C-alpha cells in the first residue's frame, strides 16, 4: 500500500478548472481498470496536485520495494511507477486536448511515494488526505504560501509519525 502525491508542472493550479479536475478524477478512478491488481483508497485532487492511496495485491507487492528497485524495475508492467506513469500520461493527453495545447507539460517529472506500513499510519494518511482541502492555504504545494521545507517537514511529521507516548517522570527515593 502506497501514499502517492503527483504535482503539476511548475505547480500550476490547473485543477482549479472544473473540467481539468474532473479529467484527473475520472483518470484516477480508472486506475483499477488499467491495473487489475491495484485498488484505490482515500484520495483528493487539489488545485495543483493529487494525493491518493494505491493498494497493490500480491502481484504488485511481489515486486521490489522502491528502496530495492532499479530504474528498470520501476517501469515494469504492474509496478507502482508504471501505474502512476500511465495515469499521468492519460491525464496529460486528455488535458492537452481540452486546452488545445499538444505536448505541453502537465505534471512534474516524478512523484512522491511513501509505503504505508501499518494501520495507524494508514489512519493518519487518510486524515491528512481528508483535511487537505481545508488546509490548502497552508499547503506547501500552494504557490501563494511561502512555507519553507523545514516547516513542511515538521507538518508532515505531525501527520505521518505516530504520536510519542509521554514518559512519566522517574521518582527516586
Image: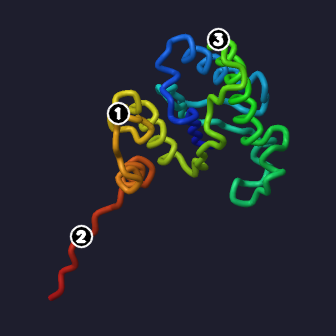
Residue 171, disc: none
- Mark nearest the camera among 3 and 2 is 3
Residue drawn at 77 percent across, 54 percent down: 64
Residue drawn at 15 percent across, 88 percent down: 173
Q: Secondary structure at mark 3?
A: helix
For mark 3, what is the residue?
98
Nearer to me, 58 or 139: 139
Residue drawn at 45 percent across, 50 percent down: 160
Decide if residue 171 is on the left or right side of residue 35.
left
Q: Earlier in the sequence, mark 3 or mark 2?
A: 3
Give the CA separation, mark 1 to mark 2: 34 Å
Give the CA separation, mark 3 to mark 2: 60 Å
**Crowding at mark 1 (Cα within 10 Å: few <14, some 14-19, many 20+):** few
Q: Quadrant of residue 28?
A: top right
Q: Secondary structure at mark 2?
A: loop
Q: Earlier in the sequence, mark 1 or mark 2?
A: 1
Decide if residue 37 is on the left or right side of residue 172.
right
Circles 1 and 3: CB distance less than 8 Å?
A: no
Q: Position of residue 29 (x, y in %)?
A: 65, 21
Give the CA separation, mark 1 to mark 3: 29 Å
Q: Secondary structure at mark 1?
A: helix
Q: Position of residue 115 (x, y in %)?
A: 61, 49
Q: Earlier in the sequence, mark 1 or mark 3?
A: 3
Decide if residue 146 is on the left or right side of residue 66.
left
For mark 1, what is the residue?
135
- Mark nearest the camera among 1 and 2 is 1
Q: Quadrant of residue 33?
A: top right
For mark 2, what is the residue?
168
Q: Position of residue 71 (x, y in %)?
A: 79, 53
- Mark nearest the camera among 1 and 3 is 3
Amino acid at each position: 500500500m502506497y501514499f502517492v502525491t503527483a504535482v503539476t508542472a511548475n505547480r500550476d493550479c490547473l485543477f482549479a478548472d472544473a473540467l481539468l479536475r474532473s479529467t484527473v478524477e475520472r483518470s484516477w478512478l480508472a486506475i483499477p481498470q488499467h491495473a487489475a491488481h491495484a485498488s484505490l483508497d482515500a484520495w483528493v485532487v487539489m488545485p495543483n496536485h493529487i494525493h491518493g492511496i494505491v493498494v497493490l495485491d500480491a502481484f504488485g507487492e511481489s515486486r521490489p520495494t522502491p528502496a530495492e528497485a532499479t530504474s528498470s524495475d520501476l517501469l515494469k508492467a504492474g509496478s507502482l511507477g508504471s501505474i502512476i506513469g500511465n495515469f499521468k500520461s492519460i491525464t496529460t493527453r486528455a488535458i492537452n486536448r481540452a486546452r488545445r495545447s499538444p505536448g505541453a507539460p502537465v505534471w512534474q517529472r516524478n512523484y512522491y511515494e511513501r509505503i504505508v506500513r501499518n494501520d495507524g499510519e494508514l489512519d493518519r494518511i487518510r486524515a491528512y488526505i481528508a483535511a487537505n482541502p481545508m488546509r490548502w492555504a497552508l499547503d506547501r504545494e500552494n504557490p501563494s504560501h511561502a512555507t519553507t521545507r523545514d516547516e513542511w517537514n515538521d507538518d508532515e511529521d505531525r501527520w505521518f509519525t505516530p504520536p510519542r507516548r509521554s514518559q512519566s517522570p522517574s521518582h527516586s527515593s
